[in-house]
Image (cartoon, rainbow, N blue to C red):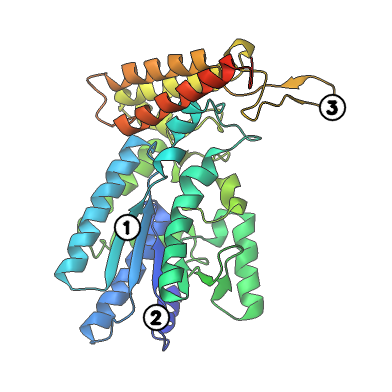
């Protein structure tokens, strides 16, 4: 059914490009596989004029194995598209250097995210992808964004499926992105059918799904999906085990990384320890300032003060610990860039100047 939907939607007589959101997880992998299989068939028949953008997002603090897997898949997809001369563009978005996790946490002192202060989702996930979509809307007038969401994954997605049935349409407008239509062709596929397809059919771009299946089995996990709106945020840091940012302190325990460690990937234990430290230090009164960055003090209904950002001393401690972690010979992943450290230092200098001039004090 979804293959027919893909083919019929692609055959419509207009040039509106497709943007396929690809996280590297099972759902987006199935979506991309079905899309490119369809496109390859169109190509063989001499009809493949509509441009397809494969867009992945890297928060720059992704779980090491999943970003390694994602980058490998993107390389294969690029090669496949060139070899078959397909109208496919592969893009990886990242947060702007001024909005990265470390610039905000270590530079500005934003406390480690929790459920009530989840400042990371919008900056690291939503804005980079939406920026690219808006650029394509400006260039083409309209876009159709394909999301690998399935009704079996959540109550909200079941409602989307029901709404689509009631309106008899496969497309729905995005809540906030003007001239962006959302297409969810795999919404009715269940888990058994999904795994059957991935187990029996290799990806058209080459290789196999063996590594992806092994990742899920070892971590007993899912992949945090691509997000285009804050209403999707509850899936990030939810109760179920998911691959996401290794720094995620919204969750109580990182079950995916812990699962990988239990399966023999002991090299990730220092990352878990550092994540736990980030969650622990936000609760220490001595590590936080009384005033927010705007100089104000906020209180609860009972009159108690709501803690502000990390003190500059705490931020320097965190950077030192992160650099020590980066220096570990077993650490193959780049944790923080020199450009990020440069911006962090600039923020500290300004904050120290403001602190001394009494603009905001501890």
Instruction: Give left or right: position of 310 versus 45.
Output: right
Question: Which mark is first along the chain, 2 or 3?
Answer: 2
Residue at the image position 49 percent from the left and 39 percent from the top? 241
- Front-most of 311 and 346? 346
For the C terminus, give its image quadrant: top right
- Front-most of 303 and 86? 303
Residue 14, how many percent across, how many down? 41, 86
Residue 126, how many percent across, how many down? 50, 51
Residue of label 1:
91
Residue at the image position 58 percent from the left and 71 percent from the top? 173
CB under 8 Å between discs 3 and 2: no
Residue of label 3:
301
Instruction: Give left or right: position of 47 versus 177.
Output: left
- Front-most of 351 and 301? 351
Question: Which mark is first along the chain, 1 or 3?
Answer: 1
Residue at the image position 53 percent from the left and 25 percent from the top? 109
Residue 353, how many percent across, how many down? 52, 19
Query: Can see residue 225?
Result: no
Q: Image height check: is 339 above or below 73?
A: above
Residue of label 2:
10
Question: Among all residues in the image, which is located at the extreme front?
Answer: 357
Question: Among all residues in the image, which is located at the extreme left?
Answer: 83
Q: Secondary structure at mark 1?
A: strand
Q: Secondary structure at mark 3?
A: loop
Q: Residues within 10 Å of mark 1 (few under 14, many from 20)?
A: some
Q: Nearer the viewer, mark 3 or mark 2?
A: 3
């Amino acid at each position: 059914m979804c293959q027919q939907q893909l083919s019929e939607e692609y055959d419509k007589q207009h040039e509106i490009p497709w943007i396929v959101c690809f996280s590297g997880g099972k759902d987006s992998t199935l979506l991309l596989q079905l899309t490119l299989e369809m496109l390859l068939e169109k190509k063989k028949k001499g009809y493949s004029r509509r441009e397809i953008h494969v867009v992945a997002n890297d928060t720059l603090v992704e779980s090491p194995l999943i970003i390694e897997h994602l980058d490998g898949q993107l390389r294969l997809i690029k090669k496949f598209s060139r070899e078959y001369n397909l109208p496919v563009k592969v893009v990886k978005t990242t947060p702007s250097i001024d909005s990265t996790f470390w610039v905000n946490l270590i530079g500005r002192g934003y406390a480690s995210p929790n459920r009530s202060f989840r400042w990371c989702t919008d900056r690291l996930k939503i804005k980079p992808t939406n920026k690219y979509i808006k650029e394509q809307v400006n260039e083409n007038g309209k876009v159709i964004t394909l999301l690998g969401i399935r009704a079996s994954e959540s109550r909200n997605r079941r409602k989307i499926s029901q709404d689509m049935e009631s309106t008899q349409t496969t497309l729905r407008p995005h809540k906030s992105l003007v001239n962006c239509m959302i297409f969810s062709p795999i919404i009715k596929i269940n888990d058994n059918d999904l795994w059957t397809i991935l187990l029996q059919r290799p990806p058209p771009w080459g290789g196999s799904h063996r590594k992806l299946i092994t990742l899920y089995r070892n971590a007993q996990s899912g992949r945090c999906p691509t997000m285009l709106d804050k209403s999707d945020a509850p899936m990030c840091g939810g109760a179920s085990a998911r691959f996401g940012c290794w720094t995620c302190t919204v969750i109580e325990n990182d079950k995916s990384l812990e699962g990988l460690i239990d399966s023999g990937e002991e090299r990730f234990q220092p990352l878990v320890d550092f994540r736990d430290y980030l969650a622990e230090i936000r609760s220490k009164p001595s590590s936080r300032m009384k005033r927010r960055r705007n100089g104000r003090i906020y209180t609860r209904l009972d009159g108690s003060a709501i803690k502000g950002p990390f003190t500059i001393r705490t931020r320097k401690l965190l950077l030192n610990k992160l650099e020590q972690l980066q220096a570990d010979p077993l650490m193959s992943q780049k944790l923080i860039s020199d450009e990020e450290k440069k911006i962090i230092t600039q923020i500290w200098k300004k904050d120290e100047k403001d602190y001394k001039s009494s603009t905001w004090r501890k």
